[in-house]
Amino acid sequence: MPGLLPLTAMPTAACAIRPRRVARAAAASLLVVALALVGRAAQAAPFENTTAQRMLACTGCHGREGRAASDGYYPRIAGKPAGYLFNQLRNFRDERRHYELMGGLLALLDDAYLREIADYFAALDLPYPAPPAPVEPPSVLAAGEALVRRGDPARAIPACNDCHGVAMTGRAPFIPGLLGLPRDYLNAQLGAWQNGKRKAIAPDCMAQIAARLTPADIGAVSAWLAAQPVPAHASAEAARAGALPIACGGDDLGTQPAAPAVTR
Amino acid sequence: MKLGRAAAIAVAAGAAALLLAAAAVAWLNRDDELDRAQVPASADAARDLVARGEYLVRAGSCLGCHTEAGKAPYAGGRAIETPFGIVHAPNLTPDRATGLGAWSSDDFWRALHNGRSRDGRLLYPAFPYPNYTRLARADADAMFAYLNSLAPVAKTNKRHALGFPFDQPAALAVWRALFFRPGRFESNATQTSQWNRGAYLVETLGHCNACHSRRNVFGATAGPLDLAGGLIPIQNWYAPSLKDNTEAGVGEWPEAEVVALLKTGVSTLGSTQGPMAEVVARSTQYLSDADLAAMASYLRSLAPAASRPAAVTTATTSAAPRDRGAEIYKTHCAACHGDDGAGVAGAYPRLAGNRAVMLSPPANLVHTVRQGGFLPVTAGNPRPFGMPPYATLLSDDDIAKVLTYVRSSWGQHGAPVSTLEVSRYRGTAAR
């Protein structure tokens, strides 16, 4: 499964995968995908000249309306802040994030269209299925919750809540929510930040934070986050002034150096 | 003693032969003489020169190779993979230490016309000087003036990473002795000025044959006029023949459709994908309607309507794999492309009666199904429709079966696609 490729970026200790469970989960997710696709084919909605019609190129992997299957690899994109989604689309196109299929799809799209795509998925408000039951022992989950809620001042690790919102549903317009994401996806992102595979516009605050995490920290945080339910109408917190605990780039839309419309 | 003398004679003869060969290679690598540089007479003329240069640099598709994704335009650094190793495109901005800041327009012309750098080094032909050599000096001067007008970016050029012996200057000299001579664009007096303008754009600036022709084992094409199609090395996309109306020849297309395709990436008769979508996005969408019509005029003459070769006959496919292909088509393809393969005009390509579906080799179909893609964003098509990637959902065997189904449905009789072909064309791409 190519979707699992970025998992090679994961630190090994965070990669406590049990083959049989994975096989069962994979079979279940394939079944879900197959049913979803059969369902779609059967409905065969009439063609409409809309953004939603255009976004069928995205929902093949991210799920209908941009929801991730709870045990899949691909992240949910529905309802995330538009600025965050726009930055990620630019990061894939401009090779600060690396996933071959995403990079290829976006290579010849300009900022205006990426903005439309981001706005479309940000505006979706969908109920989420309950998260899968965690497989980690309570001590690991407790350690994860502690890091998320309080951070670790001794190691200069801020609490996730400080930026991503008290409810962890993100903060408009640039900071993503952390719920509704598969554990493997969270592990892979934190691992990719540690080894430089995932980058953001400088200053790359998440890269700095990830560098301070141990593999056990990453496993615990991902496990706890992936086990939390997504509240109904989980929109991001409103934008508010006030310094973040650490400086982050990518919040200066419009003042970016003018990139050529297409650069690959 | 006799043997000693014979050996000495043989050594001397061998040395003489080597010297002669080296002299011949050196002679065949000599520079063509310099044309005179054009010096703008006024500030207005200088501004016009820069504007014309920007247009020509776009027509020459320089941006694609000389820019790294997400980095400063024209500052170089992109790795161009070739069968001989990696060539890194250099910095074209006017930075004195790392770019073209210390170059004169004579130096720039020597690079384009003779394939030789300012310091005398021979240049690798991944830089398409076998095409650019035919540029008019006035055009080269305008391009240089534009590049000189950019903000200088200090970015040191990366070394090429070529295998032995391709990294040796002598090997490059021999290659050039065999396959390159400086040249000039010769107008064809029997054709209109529009046709000649089109020929100039296609053969020199556009360097269309860099993809649309077959390369020999040394990576050389048969020259800028060869547009008979070829598999692009490393990328493994097939650039179809521009001389054959069953491939990408436009002899049977109205001029306006050719112009629309090059300007917007989509026309009612076909759309661009893969490397050609990149060409439209970075280059041809910016050309004037007059220049696009000139290219259409030239391209249409390459494939006269009468030149359609006999349709390929086909092997019949056995029923079982075809049934599986039909099932996959119904599940994954029919919602957009239709049960009848008719597609949706302007959004989803028609598959029934689409010559791009019938190309041999079927490389482009494999890439399209695996990677999906959007049509390129252009001023004329700013919100393109797209197709999701199926690399994660369909195995090589499934892709072979569904492609075989498409190529043998709705009255089409294309050759089947084998699992082995799918594996071969996707190459090392992720599964």
Image (tube, helix red, strand yellow):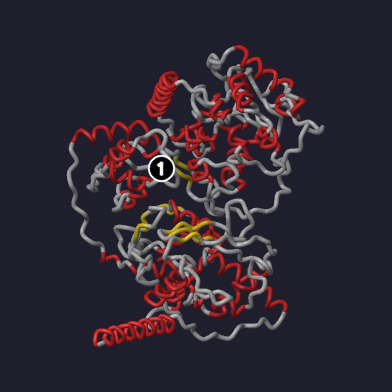
Residue furthest top as drawn: A138
Asked which secondary structure carries label 1, the reply is: loop
For residue B168, above or below residue A180: below
Q: Give neighbour class at mark 1: few <14, some 14-19, many 20+ (Cα, 10 Å).
A: few
- Front residue of this view, candidates B44 and B255: B44
Residue furthest right as drawn: A242
- Determine which residue is flagged by label 1: B344
Residue B38, image x and y in percent?
Answer: 62, 83
Asked which quadrant contains residue A166, the reply is top right
Q: Quadrant of the C terminus of chain B?
A: top left
For residue B231, above or below residue B190: above
Looking at the picture, which amino acid does disc 1 mark? Val
Asked which quadrant contains residue B340, the reply is top left
Residue A199, image x and y in percent?
Answer: 63, 41
Q: Quadrant of the N terminus of chain B?
A: bottom left
The residue drawn where x is 30% and y is 87% is B9
Side (left or right) of B3 relative to B121 = left
